[in-house]
Amino acid sequence: MKLPLLLCLLALSTAYGHRILCMFPVPTRSHNILGKGIADALLQAGHEVTYVTPYPDIMKPAKGLRVVNVNATLKIFEGMDIINTATKGDFRKVLAYGRDIISIAMETPELQNILKKEDFDAVVSEWFFSDVNAGIAAALRVPWILLSGTVMSSHMESLVDDIRTTAIIPALLAEFPIPMSLWQRLMNTFITAGMTFGTWLDQASNEALYHSLFGPIAEARGVTLPPYMDALYNVSILFSNSHPSMSTAQSLPPNVVQIAGYHIDMKIPPLPKDLQDLLDGSPQGVVYFSMGSVVKSAAIPLEQRQDLIRVLGALPYTVLWKFEEPIEGLPKNVHVRPWMPQPSILAHPNVRLFITHGGMLSALEAVNAGVPLLSIPVYGDQSTNAFRSVVAGYALRVPFRPWSAAAFEDALKEILGNDSYYKRAKHLSKVFHNRPVEPSKLISHYVETAIETQGAYHLRSPSRHYQWYERYMFDQLVVILAVLYILGKILKALFRFIKSLFVGSKVSKVKKETKSKKVKAQ
């Protein structure tokens, strides 16, 4: 009796699974690890997922999964010197990359065919320096679930609510403490205003691209593409890759859901046997060193590389270094490999320190495992990620440029010789794990909520029902000023009237007295 019932329930769950399009065309593996986490959570919940990615190998074959290869986007970063471009602060190119990525991905014939002919129940996409992705859900007429791969920023806040945090929370790339001083708050306001102004300047080109990319899709589907601004602010659910254990707590609408750590498998995969033996045989401790998937270790200047080898070789610890090329003459304690199973390494109890570029995923995986950080930030949000880690008390950082081997060596001695960093990392790890439900479960729940309620309007902030001058109460201010002005005029007129009565009465009295005197004189 139980077996047929179970089979029936399984059949029902499969029958009621939703069809979800996951758009992750950004040509870096780290961003597609984020996409994989979303897709895996939805597949585990019994949904059908069409996953658009330039890395089709990142997903294992699974029931209900279809992968659309958009590897043409990989050419965007080909030949790019990320270290020199980023450290020079040339971020204008990055803004152009955001538009180029979606434009090139949309040229894929398979994706075009899917968007024109197939039906979905929801679209999940990642925000990466472009708002044009709003057109996918707009053309398909389905709820849009947006992922922010970093902590909340003023732009993400503006998509789902008003920007309310400028006075109290540092902007995404601002390295200010909390509480901020008056000067820091002024600077924070200028930074946020500058970013908002830049978004406004970018609006015309984004709107033109929105119509050129998704107008034909909507026409092929027999629907009208909504205005760009309507599509942009029609976010059903915003997933934020953040958590209060490592970012500032803030007031957010109910449709903003913090899911940091969702990409990390709660059942950490076992290490390969050789690595397991190496880490088990290092009771004195292990230092793990990786600069992520975008910044290649081989791109580190030779002199800086030699400094790293010398300093790491002098440590009384086993060092695992993710390095894409073989290195001759390494010290005995330094082990180099082109790829490392990072979450599995960090989970090993003998790991004492993670030397990192400060990428968001690396920071999350370190907090998840309770391992202190030594950050060497290179570009983007890595510097502010490192700043927050230092302020939280479980990390130190040294600059990538200008490079100082002495500063690197001093930081290593401090963090490995002072147990407070390790204890703080373990404490924050407990806070990070103290949640009523796994973050991956939140993904399926809120995506299903958006679909079943046709947009999760009950969770959205009402701010978008009002014009900007209504939200900031400028219209009320005008009314109050007008009322005060009218009252002032009335009071002034009343005062003149009363004054005229008083003066008139006094004049009349004087006249009577004068007349009376004249009569007596006669």
Image: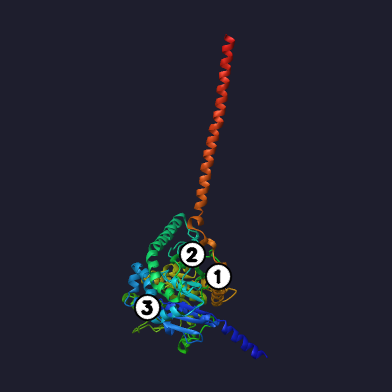
The picture places residue 265, in percent across and down from the top left corner, at 52, 81
* Mark sitting on residue 107: 3
Name the residue: 37% across, 78% down. Answer: 107
Report whether 290 appears left or right of 40. Answer: left
Secondary structure, mark 3, is loop
Distance between mark 3 and mark 1 Cα atoms: 31 Å
Distance between mark 2 and mark 3 Cα atoms: 31 Å
The picture places residue 293, in percent across and down from the top left corner, at 40, 78
Residue 450, can we see it?
A: yes
Residues at circles 2 and 3 in contact by the CB criterion of under 8 Å = no
Distance between mark 1 and mark 2 Cα atoms: 17 Å
Residue 284, can we see it?
A: no
Q: What's the image's color scheme?
A: rainbow
Q: For label 1, count other residues whose C-alpha is less than 10 Å away and answer few (under 14), some (14-19) or many (20+).
A: many
The picture places residue 501, in percent across and down from the top left corner, at 56, 28
Instruction: Decide which of 248, 72 is in the foreground and name it.
Output: 72
Which quarter of the rendering shows the C terminus?
A: top right
Q: Amino acid at mark 3?
A: Glu
Residue at mark 2: 157
Secondary structure, mark 1, is loop
Say whether disc 1 or disc 2 marks the residue closer to the N-terminus.
2
Secondary structure, mark 2, is helix
- Between marks 2 and 3 in the image, the one whose residue lies nearer the viewer: 3
* Mark sitting on residue 456: 1
